[in-house]
Image (cartoon, rainbow, N blue to C red):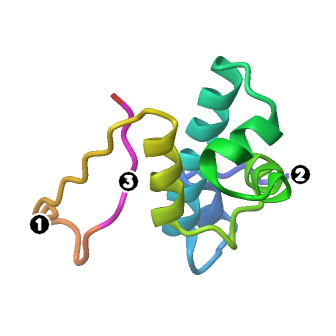
Amino acid sequence: MTEIKKSSGNVYADLGLPDAEEMLVKARLAAKIGEIIKHRHLTQQQAAEILGMPQSKISNMLRGNFRGISEAKMIECLNLLGRDIQIVVKKAPRTHATGHTSVVFA
């Protein structure tokens, strides 16, 4: 019988990856970039020109291979695609020993 475990909400953490939180943040940013590119009916080449990145790097990012792309670069991409970015730093709840990073889209 297969054991079923409830997800933590972060597939990377569920897989035991050491940089799970960062990977989830990048995945959410990449998904938003892909959504904007699709909504604007841009080809990957057109997006690459706007974002100042090689088309192959855009392709990799949209397929979930974003290890070579920093969060800062992804934020820059969102700015170049006409999105404002707001970073909010707040005190972590008392129940957490350390803070965490999340992405929220308005």
Residue 99 point in image, percent of width and height: 25, 70
Residue mark closest to the camera, 2 vs 1: 1
**Above or below, comparing residue 2 to residue 73 in the picture:** above
Q: Is residue 38 magenta?
A: no
Percent of width and height locating residue 27: 61, 52
Would you name the residue on which mark 2 appears? 1
Q: Quadrant of the C terminus?
A: top left
- Earlier-in-chain disc, 3 versus 2: 2
As drawn, the label of residue 94 is 1
Q: Which residue type does callout 1 highlight?
A: Arg
Categorize mark 2 by other alpha carbons within 10 Å: few (<14), some (14-19), many (20+): few
| Mark 2: amino acid | Met
| Percent position of residue 12, x then y | 64, 63
Q: Quadrant of residue 90?
A: bottom left
Residue appearing at x 61%, y 49% in the figure: 51
Q: Amino acid at mark 3?
A: Ser
Dot 3 crowding, Cα within 10 Å, few <14, some 14–19, many 20+ = few
Question: Which quadrant of the figure has residue 89?
Answer: bottom left
Residue drawn at x 56%, y 55% is 10
In terms of secondary structure, where does tag 3 sit? Answer: loop
Q: Is residue 18 depicted above or below 23 in this figure?
A: below
User: Separation of disc 2 and disc 1 at Cα?
Assistant: 39 Å
- Residue 102, numbered circle: 3
Of the image marks 2 and 1, the number of the one nearer the N terminus: 2
Q: Give the main secondary structure of the magenta stretch.
A: loop
